[in-house]
Amino acid sequence: VASDDGINASGKTSGNTVSILGGTINVNAQGDGLDANGSITMSGGTVTVNRQTNGGNGQIDADQGMVVTGGTLNVAGSAGMAQAPANSSTQGVVSMTFTSSQAANTTVTLKDSSGKVIATITPTKTFQNVIFSNANIKAGGTYTITAGGKDIVTFTTSSTVTYVNNNGVTQGGMGGPGQGGNMGKGQPPTGQEPSGGMKTPPGGFGSDRPAAPPGGFTNPNQVR
């Protein structure tokens, strides 16, 4: 439980890393959930992150990206600075961004095509983005996300990291290492912007994020 970042590997260089090999980690943070000036890797264990819907911090904040190769990752928090694991991850990842904030204690589940629940989280704070990663999320699989017992969206994954909103699969998100396109002068959808407007986090928005068109993003689907 932290009044600022939950786990933070910081320093004067970019070589500060977090490596999660196993065990059970539950993070309840006001700031970033998992933060590293370098990279974050996860190969085992179970990690759950809860943080509030405010745009100045992220559930995951890794300057050089987060790579997941194993374990179970369940994350909930804000949408404005949401960063998913990078496409170089070898385990499936689903990042779901709702069109509006969801109330604390709203259970979100990820079900496969047979209706079996393969991932779930009940955030303890208001949230707008959830990220799931575990061995049951496969490329080419069909999944349904529910919230509060209601089906929200059904979609088919096409790659390791799949970004989704209420309408289906979107173009991409803020995950991945490296420098990405900047946000231009456009604004994110109402309710997703941090105080003072959207700002590029350290390390950029990631190589898997499409470059912003002139004038910034105007279509909410493009923001993902």
Image (cartoon, rainbow, N blue to C red):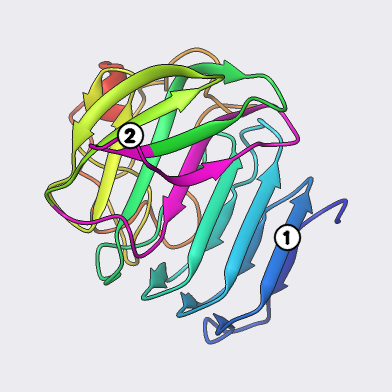
Please provide percent x and percent y for residue 96: 40, 35
Out of 147 and 165, give the one closest to the viewer: 147
| Magenta span contains residue 171 | no
**3D distance between C-alphas at marks 1 and 2:** 27 Å
Examine the rendered structure and indicate whether residue 219 appears above or below residue 165. above
**Which span of residues is magenta-colored?**
111-139
What residue is rendered at 70% in x and 67% in y?
25
Percent from the top left, x then y, of residue 90?
26, 72
Q: In which quarter of the image is the N terminus?
A: bottom right
Residue 17 as seen in the image, left or right of residue 9? left
62 or 201: nearer the viewer: 62
Image point (30%, 55%), residue name = 137
Name the amino acid type tagged 1. Asn
Amino acid type assigned to the residue bearing label 2 in the image: Gly
Q: Taking 15 as reference, is 132 above or below it? A: above
Residue in front for this viewpoint, 28 or 184: 28
